[in-house]
C-alpha cells in the first residue's frame, strides 16, 4: 500500500532536543526518535521485542535507548546490548532500526530495506539553511486523511477559486488550464493566472498594482511524497522571471508522510531569496497567511475523507481537470507494484555518520 | 432494512433559513438541505459525485448548490450544470435528489424512487398551522437508538407507571389493558386510566379535582413512522369527549425518522384547540413538561440500545403486553419485504411546485 | 478465555450502600449489585430478560429488584416474581443470578455454575477485619489492559528497578534472581535485595539505617486471580523474620478481576500487624506511596496493551526472567481447558445466608 523504498521526511531537527524521545507513526509503523549522545538522530521501532512495551516510554543512555519496563538496552541500530540480570544476550533480541539522516534541518527516514538506503538520494532542501535565503521552517499539520487526497489537492490548483475564495484564491483560477509535464517519478505543473487580484499578503507586503500576474510552478515527487513550488506574483506582463523590485517570489516545500492508511503528516516551510530579504518579519507574516490557507484545505479534505469512509464504494466521476492526478496515482501504484515484485538495488548499504 | 416508499419528516421549516445549508443523515444516507432563491426547499445527497466532498461544505447560488472543493454546480434536481474550466458537462455528473415538500411547517422527504412520490399522500398535520389551534412546534430529540425501540415505547403506555413514575405517570397505569385496533398499515390504541392522580401540569394549569380520568388515544402509522395522540384529562365519569371546562385535551405528534440502524431523529410537537387557548404561555408550559418526560424515555431507551449492542444475541422474552408491538414489527417487516420484492407504483411522478 | 469456576473479588462492601445499585462488568458479563433489605448482597445479570433494559436503571424493593422500564420484579435469585397487569408469571422470565458472599469487607462472586459454588473456598483475607491488624482497604484501579499483563508485572519484580526507579525501586533490583516455587494452582516467589536503599516511605516513617535488606515474599493464586504479599524492610542481616523494632512489615493484597478481554478491575489493600500499629495515620501514608507506585505500573502496562493492540501479531521474545510468568500462563490455560472439557464438581449447591 505504501512505497517503502523512499526517503520520507520524519520530522524537523528541532523536534529532537537533549535526551527527549519523540514517538511518531509513519507508514503504519510506530517509531521512536531520539538523538544519541554523539548528536546523531536515531529511529527505532517503538516496541520492545521482549514484552512489546513502547520504547518511547524508555530512557536514553549514551547512544542507546533503555526500555523502562524490564530494562533491556538497545543500541542505535536496534540490537539489544544488555538484559539486566542475564549474562548472555540473544541475537534474537533486536528491534527494527531505520536509516535516519539529518540534513538542512530536516530528519529523513528510509522505510525500505536498510541496505537499499542511499543518503545521496535524499532530496535537496538547501534553502532551509543557505546564505541569501530567508526560510520559515517547522511547519506541521496533522491530517486525518489519506495522503493521496492531500496530494490530489496540491496537484489541482483550480481548487484555489473555491476552497480559498475568501483568502488567497480568486474565482478566475477556477477555469485555468495548467501546463503539465510528466517525468519518470514526478510531475511538473505550471499554473498561470494573468491580470487577477493579488492575495491579501501581496497587497499588505508590497506595492504591487491592483491586478497582477500570478505564476505557480510546482513539482510533485512521488518517491518521497513531497511538493516543491515557486510562486511568483509580478506586475502585469513581467512574466515568471520578473526582475521588478515589486515582484514577490516564494518557495514552498511540503512533505506528506503517511501516518497510516487514513492519516498523514504534513511538514512544510516557506522560503525566499530575492525579495524583501532585509525586511524583518516578512517571512513570518507571509507564512502565517499560507498557514491559514492550508487550514482551509484541511477542512475540505478531512470532510472528503470522512465522506469516503461513510460510503467506501461510492464511485468518483472524473472531470477534465482530473487527468493529472489520475495519472499520478497510476504512476504511484505502478511504483508500489514494481517495488513489491522486485525491488531494485540502487544503493550502497546505509551507514549513518556524524558528517552525513 | 428501512421502508423507503414513505414520506418521512426531514425537519422543521425553520431549520432552513436564508442561504444556510443543513446536513442531516436519514435512513443511512447523508443529505444536504437548503432553500432555493425561489423559496422552495431542496434535498440532495450530501456527497459531490466528483471527488465525494460533502456538498454541505458548499455554497448556495440561486436555486443551485455549488461544491466548494472544485466548483461543480448542481441544480435542485441534482444535475450538474457547471464544471469550471470545462465547456461540456457530462450527463453522468449528477447527485441523487430527493422529493421534498414543505407543509404545515414540516419538511417531508420521499426516500423511495422519485417517480413513486405522491405529495397527496403526505400526512395531514394541519394543527401546526390552523385557526383555533395553539401549537408548540419545533421539538427535536436526537436518539442514539434504533427507531423500533422508540416506537415500542410509544406503543406500550404501561411504561408510564415506571419510566415516568416521578413525573407524568402513576403506578396504576402499570396494570392497564389497552384496547387495540389494527389497520392495514397502522395501529390504534386506547389506553384509559380512571380515577387516578393527574400529571403535574394538569394540577398546575387547571382546577381539576384530585382524581381524574385519563384517556390516551393514539395511532402509530408504520409508513412514515409517526405517532399521533389525543390525550384527555377529564373530571371523573365525564368520558373521553368531556365538554367540561376543566378537561384538558392535548394533541401530540411525534415523527421518528431513522438516522441510521442505531440512531434516530425524533421530531415532535404539541397542540390543543379546545381548552385554555386564550391563556398565554399554557402551551409552552405543557410542552416543557412533556419534553422532560421524553428525556426519561430517552434515558431508558438509549440504555436498552446499549445493552442490546453489548449482547446482540440475547433473546427477548415476551410478556402479554408485547402482543401489540410484536404484531406491529411483523407488519413493518412485511411492508419492507413487499417493497423490496415489487414496489407498488401508486403515484404520479413527483414535481415540486411553489404552491405545494 | 476466562476461568469461571472461581471466587473473584467483585467489589468492596462499602460500594453497596442503602438501596443503591452498582453496575460492573466482570468476565465480559454486565452485572448489577445491590444489598437487599435483609442486608445480604445480591448479584444479577444487568439485563432484563424482557426487553433487555439494564436492571441497574431499576429500583430495589425489599430483597427484590424492579426493572423500571415495564416494571418486572426479580427476586434475589433472578426469578421474575411480578409482571404488572399479568396474573401468571412464566418460569422463562428469569435473569442470571450469581452466588455472592460478603466476607471481611470484600464481595466475592462465583462466575461458574452456581451448583459448584462453595463458600468455604473463598480466600482468607482476615487481616481486613481482625484485632491487631491495621488495614487500609478500598483500593481500586480501573485498568485498560488484559488481566494477564498485570499479573505478569506482579510476577516479575525485576521491573521495580525500571518502572519504579524514581519511587520505590532501586537499580539493584534489576539483577535479582528470585526463588520460585510452583504449586498446583499457584506460585510463590521470594525476591530479596540485600544492602540497598530503602524506599521513600521507609526513610520517612522509620529510623532504619541508610542501607537495608528488603524481602518480598508473594503468592499468586491463579484460581481467583489474586496476589498476596509480605514485604519486609529490615536492618541488614536481620533476615525476613526480623524482630527488630525498626523492621517494617507490610501485607499487600491485590485481586485482579477481568472486566473484559482488554480491561480489568484491580482491587487492593495494605495491612500490617507488627510495626507502628499505634502510630496514627501510618497505614494511610504507606498506602498513598504504594498507590502512586501502582500508577507507575498502570502507565507502562496500559502502554504495553496499546502497543499489543496496534500489532496483534508481533511476537514476544522471552528472556531468562520470563520463565515464571510463562509457566503461570500455561498453568492458567490448562485450568481453563480442564474447566471447559469437564468441570469438576467440588462443591455443594450454593445458598447465601445472612451469617455467611
Image (cartoon, coloured by chain):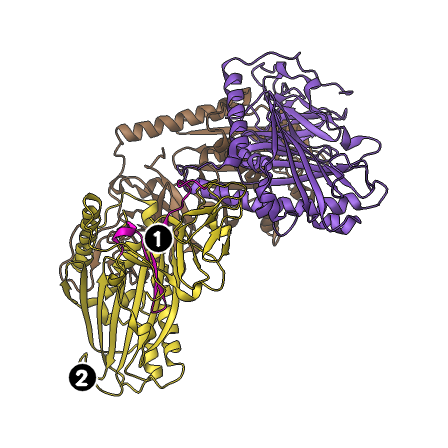
Chain colours: A purple, B yellow, C brown
Foreground residue among B200 and B12: B12
Q: Up-down: is A323 above or below A244?
A: above
- Report whether residue C289 is seen: no
Helix, strand or loop for disc 1: strand
Q: Up-down: is C315 above or below B119?
A: above
Residue at (61% x, 22% y) in the render: A183
Q: Up-down: is B55 above or below B353?
A: above
Q: Mark 1, chain letter?
A: B
| Residue A78: % across, % down | 63, 21
Helix, strand or loop for disc 2: loop
Foreground residue among A112 and B236: A112
Q: Mark 2, chain letter?
A: B
Q: Are marks 2 and 1 in contact (CB under 8 Å)?
A: no
From the image, tell me which residue sits under label 2.
Answer: B238
Foreground residue among B314 and A88: B314
Both marks 2 and 1 on one chain: yes
| Residue C249: % across, % down | 58, 40
What's drawn in magenta, residue-wise?
B89-117
Closer to the eye: label 2 or 1: 1
Report the number of discs: 2
- Label 1 crowd bin: few (<14), some (14–19), many (20+), radius 10 Å: many
- Label 2 crowd bin: few (<14), some (14–19), many (20+), radius 10 Å: some
| Residue A164: % across, % down | 61, 48
Q: Which picture quadrant has residue C346?
A: top left
Disc on the earlier residue, 2 or 1: 1
Q: CA distance from mark 2 to mark 1?
A: 48 Å
Is B30 part of what is drawn in magenta? no
From the image, tell me which residue sits under label 1.
Answer: B98
State the mark number for residue A130.
none
- Report whether residue B202 is seen: yes
Amino acid at each position: 500500500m505504501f512505497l517503502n523504498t523512499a526517503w520520507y521526511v520524519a520530522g524537523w531537527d528541532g523536534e529532537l532536543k537533549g535526551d527527549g524521545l519523540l514517538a511518531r507513526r509513519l507508514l503504519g509503523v510506530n517509531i521512536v526518535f531520539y538523538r544519541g549522545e554523539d548528536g546523531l538522530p536515531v529511529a527505532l521501532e517503538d516496541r520492545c521485542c521482549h514484552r512489546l512495551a513502547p520504547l518511547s516510554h524508555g530512557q536514553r543512555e549514551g547512544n542507546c535507548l533503555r526500555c523502562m519496563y524490564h530494562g533491556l538496552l538497545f543500541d542505535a541500530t536496534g540490537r539489544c546490548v544488555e538484559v539486566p540480570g542475564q549474562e548472555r544476550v540473544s541475537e534474537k533480541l533486536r528491534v527494527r532500526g531505520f536509516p535516519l539522516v539529518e540534513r538542512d534541518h530536516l530528519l529523513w527516514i528510509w522505510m525500505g530495506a536498510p541496505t537499499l538506503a542511499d543518503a545521496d538520494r535524499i532530496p535537496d532542501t538547501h534553502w532551509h539553511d543557505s546564505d541569501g535565503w530567508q526560510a520559515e521552517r517547522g511547519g506541521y499539520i496533522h491530517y486525518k486523511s489519506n495522503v493521496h487526497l492531500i496530494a490530489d489537492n496540491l496537484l489541482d490548483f483550480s481548487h484555489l477559486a473555491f476552497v480559498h475564495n475568501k483568502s488567497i484564491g480568486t474565482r478566475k483560477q477556477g477555469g485555468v488550464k495548467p501546463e503539465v509535464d510528466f517525468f519518470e517519478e514526478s510531475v511538473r505543473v505550471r499554473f498561470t493566472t494573468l491580470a487577477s487580484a493579488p492575495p491579501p499578503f501581496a497587497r499588505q507586503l508590497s506595492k504591487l498594482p491592483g491586478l497582477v500576474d500570478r505564476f505557480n510552478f510546482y513539482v510533485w515527487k512521488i518517491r518521497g511524497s513531497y511538493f516543491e513550488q515557486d510562486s511568483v506574483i509580478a506586475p502585469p506582463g513581467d512574466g515568471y522571471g520578473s526582475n521588478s523590485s515589486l515582484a514577490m517570489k516564494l518557495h514552498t516545500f511540503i512533505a506528506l508522510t503517511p501516518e497510516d492508511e487514513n492519516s498523514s503528516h504534513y511538514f512544510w516551510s516557506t522560503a525566499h531569496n530575492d525579495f524583501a530579504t532585509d525586511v524583518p518579519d516578512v517571512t513570518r507574516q507571509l507564512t502565517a497567511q499560507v498557514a491559514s490557507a492550508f487550514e482551509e484545505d484541511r477542512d475540505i479534505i478531512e470532510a472528503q475523507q470522512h465522506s469516503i469512509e461513510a460510503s467506501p464504494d461510492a464511485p468518483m466521476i472524473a472531470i477534465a481537470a482530473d487527468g493529472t492526478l489520475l495519472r499520478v496515482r497510476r504512476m504511484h501504484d505502478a511504483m508500489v507494484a514494481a517495488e513489491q515484485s522486485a525491488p531494485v538495488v540502487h544503493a550502497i548499504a546505509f551507514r549513518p555518520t556524524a558528517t552525513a
